[in-house]
Image (cartoon, grey):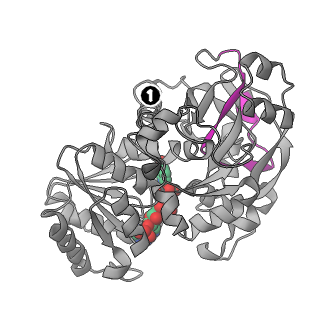
Amino acid sequence: MSEILDAVLAGASPETLAELPMATTTRAVFVRRDEQHMFEGLSSAEKDPRKSLHVDEVPVPELAPDEVYVAVMASSINFNTVWTSIFEPLSTFGFLDRLAKESIWGARHALDYHVVGSDASGVVLRAGSMVRNWKVGDEVTVHCNYVDDQDPSSHDDSMLASNQRIWGFETNFGGLADVCVVKANQLMPKPTHLTWEEAAVNALCNSTAYRMLISHNGAPVSEGDKVLIWGASGGLGAFAVQHVLNSGGIPVGVVSNDAKAKLLRDLGCEHVINREEQGYRFWIDEHTQDESEWRRLGKDIRALVGSDPDIVFEHPGRQTMGASVFVAKRGGTIVTCAATSGYMIEYDNRHLWMRLKTIKGSHFANYREAWSANQAIVDGRVVPPLSAVFPLEGTGEAAFEVHHNRHEGKIGVLCLAPKEGLGVSDPALRARVGEDRLRVFRRASEG
Ligand code: NAP
């Protein structure tokens, strides 16, 4: 790998890169099949990613004709790596075993280890024989929608394909490694004004927020729309806020401390609710919700922006869904992509039907949506919410931070990149976007 890294850092030509021998093994972060029951009997909070995420050399698999090897310069922590590392809601080895039944290429994925990671920035090292639009040496970011084109449904919206998967979560050979394997239709151009680690933290969360709030497949924001955003300084929320602002909407960001509230204001989100300060208790006990607390949240939103939210950006799930359905305006939409606090949801259906509201399910993004979301980063319209950077060996620690909600925005992970700050090829664009804007989350985490 060191020869490959030296060549990438020296800006070697595609010909030179192509001539270098391909690595047969790679450093990678993985969970082990024989440890998938290691946390049984523990609460979620007690399950420790630092114990289950290992870093070691693993073999580089054979390349399928529609795939490329990417020399990964940087990757990021997504919540799905937390899920994999605590084996919740189920072990991801089941996903790999199902994929293995699909084809001979799918069979490569069912191993005794699962290499995780659903984001990456890097350089194409080799391209399979069917790859048309990408070549060795291309600087890329990777989105995580893993689909084939042999399902008719995928030709309208690839997220509807029956075998749609999330790379590095429902497939093996993910981005938290020095070399990853991806389908060519996961590649997107790396934003030239960003460092490797800034470029690596966007694709998963940015594309998801884009589909939820910009695409016609989600709940597209119109000028003047008020949008309640839970976890507004978290991975998804940081992108949601920027997309709402760029669309002329009015975000109301919910966070859980003052530092995050300040961060949001620095990002341009004027209206912020600190949920800890307000002390909302939507649940009286495990089975009972308190409508008066939903009402209190609704009043707080009206006090800030004058009316009920047109759209609620949902992902905390069980803890907040009742409140989200209640506070959405008459005819409004609750768009949801997750359920961090529990997926068995309860809300008062009367508030949904009598007030003609819609709950819209959303999941990642199709290639077009991911590409458009990436373009917003490429143009500098959306900035990466990178708050901290860990070495690959520190992935367990980084996932622990995310598991315990101790982070802001996104955590980057250096894979082949030997240090931070490398990879910018358009400093003039970087200057135009502004170092200050690019470092909003970094500054906040540095205090
Ligand atoms: P994240 O970086 O941890 O941010 C989530 C934010 O939610 C936190 O910053 C926290 O903000 C807030 N939060 C957590 N628990 C909460 C609760 N009980 N009530 C209210 N707010 C709460 O995670 P993320 O990357 O944004 O992902 C969030 C969820 O979406 C995860 O479950 C993830 O797996 C899922 N996801 C799904 C997709 C998809 O395609 N379906 C894509 C990306 C992520 P405060 O504490 O500041 O309020």
| Foreground residue among 423 and 319 | 423
Quadrant of the rendered structure where residue 153 is? top left
Residue at 75%, 26% (x, y): give it.
Answer: 63
Q: Is 374 included in the stretch rendered in magenta?
A: no
> Left of 315 or right of it: where is 215?
left
Residue 253 coordinates in the image, percent (x, y): 32, 63
> Left of 305 or right of it: where is 414?
right
Label total for image: 1
Seen in the picture, residue 187 relative to 211 is either above or below; the reply is: above
Circle 1: residue type: Ser
Secondary element at image label 1: helix
Residue 197 coordinates in the image, percent (x, y): 61, 46
| Foreground residue among 41 and 143 | 143
Q: Is 116 included in the stretch rendered in magenta?
A: yes
Residue 387 coordinates in the image, percent (x, y): 54, 58
Seen in the picture, residue 283 relative to 219 is either above or below; the reply is: below
Residue at 32%, 56% (x, y): give it.
Answer: 268
Residue 332 coordinates in the image, percent (x, y): 19, 53
Say which residue label 1 marks.
153
Q: Which stretch is magenta?
A: 105-130
Seen in the picture, residue 7 relative to 305 is either above or below; the reply is: above
Q: Do we see residue 232 in this rendering?
A: yes
Residue at 41%, 38% (x, y): give it.
Answer: 432
Seen in the picture, residue 150 relative to 38 is either above or below; the reply is: above
For label 1, being within 8 Å of ligand 1 is answered no
Quadrant of the rendered structure where residue 343 is? bottom left
